[in-house]
Amino acid sequence: MNRRIFMKTVGAGGLAIASGPGLMAARVRNIGLQLYTVRNEMEKDFEGSLARVAQIGYKEVEFAGYFGRTPQQVKDLLKKNGLKTPSSHIGLNLFEQDLPKTLETGRILGQKYLVCPSLPEPRRKTVDDFKKLAELFNRLGAECKKAGMAFAYHNHAFEFEPLNGQMPYDLLLQNTDPKLVKMEMDLYWVVKANQDPVAYFEKYPGRFALVHVKDMDTTPEKGFAEVGRGNMDFKKIFGASKKAGIKHYVVEQDRTPGNPFDSIKISWDYLSNFHY
């Protein structure tokens, strides 16, 4: 076999191997758990629950309250279990009423994103309401940035109910500074609202630093399911992750059919082996 034929054969073989299953596909990295999923267990046994989450394989957790523990106590527990907390859910009232303490807690825990998880119903009735919220988000984002962190917003489905022909979620995105406000897109709620996550990634590239990964069951109610056991098209969604700007993939299941630790293990096993 002469060199030209040899190189052609190697080249063709290399391409076939590189194009084989898994080798050209990307894997999901920075998989975390929103601890709201195990909220009842956290309340009963905070320390033991964190240990169980780590034993399943998770390396990142997103808090939804600290159950009376100090930031230093939480930091010590995270270190003990080999966990990091890139983000936390913090009520809008805490952002407004005690921002210095909120920022200090985030600093101690090494958090990168402080996330507003929802909006009080009386403050989200009109287009002007959402524009005012966007202004507030920009101010909070500026303070978070000064402290070395970023402000982010987590959606539900109400942001996709039009107000005077305008979509509230778009109002938030269009009226906030991309340098100050990031989004934590809850993929389940976007799909349940009959919207396409990828369309938003393409329309607002780089805005979605985090996503909540949860699956949708096949019942008429479109309830919650363990990741991989529903009908969400994660291959399509994660295929646009670079354009979206996703840095962290956070598993969440608002309700589980049985023991939530069984559910989060199913989701971990699926997502940690998922290729797209």
Image (tube, rainbow, N blue to C red):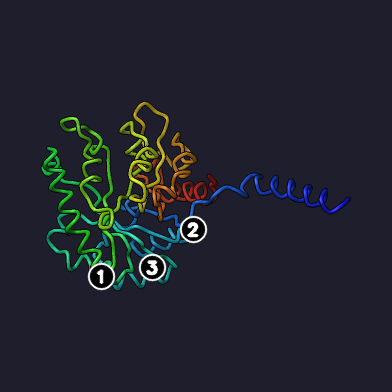
Q: CA distance from mark 3 to mark 2?
A: 14 Å
Q: Nearer the viewer, residue 175 or 268?
A: 175
Q: CA distance from mark 3 to mark 1?
A: 12 Å
Residue type pointed to by label 3: Leu
Residue that mark 1 sits on: 70
18 to the left or right of 236: right
Q: Is residue 236 above or below residue 210?
A: above
Residue type pointed to by label 1: Thr
Residue type pointed to by label 2: Gly
For mark 3, does the 10 Å Cα neighbourhood hold few (<14), some (14 to 19), or many (20 or more) residues? many
Point 40% across, 52% down: residue = 246
| Residue farthest along the top direction in this orientation | 220
Residue that mark 3 sits on: 78
Please report whichever mark, 3 or 2, sits nearer to the chain's N-terminal start.
2
**Residue 126, picture quadrant:** top left
Point 49% across, 51% down: residue = 28
Q: For the residue labelled by badge 1, is the local secondary structure a helix, a strand or a loop?
A: loop
Q: For the residue labelled by badge 3, is the local secondary structure a helix, a strand or a loop?
A: helix
For mark 1, does the 10 Å Cα neighbourhood hold few (<14), some (14 to 19), or many (20 or more) residues? few
Point 62% across, 50% down: residue = 23
Residue 136 drawn at (x, y percent): 15, 53
Residue 34 drawn at (x, y percent): 35, 53
Please report whichever mark, 3 or 1, sits nearer to the chain's N-terminal start.
1
**Residue 60, picture quadrant:** bottom left
Q: For the residue labelled by badge 2, is the local secondary structure a helix, a strand or a loop?
A: loop
Residue 43 drawn at (x, y percent): 29, 57
Residue that mark 2 sits on: 57
104 to the left or right of 79: left
Q: CA distance from mark 1 to mark 2?
A: 25 Å
Q: Is residue 96 above or below residue 123?
A: below
Q: Nearer the viewer, residue 212 or 83?
A: 212
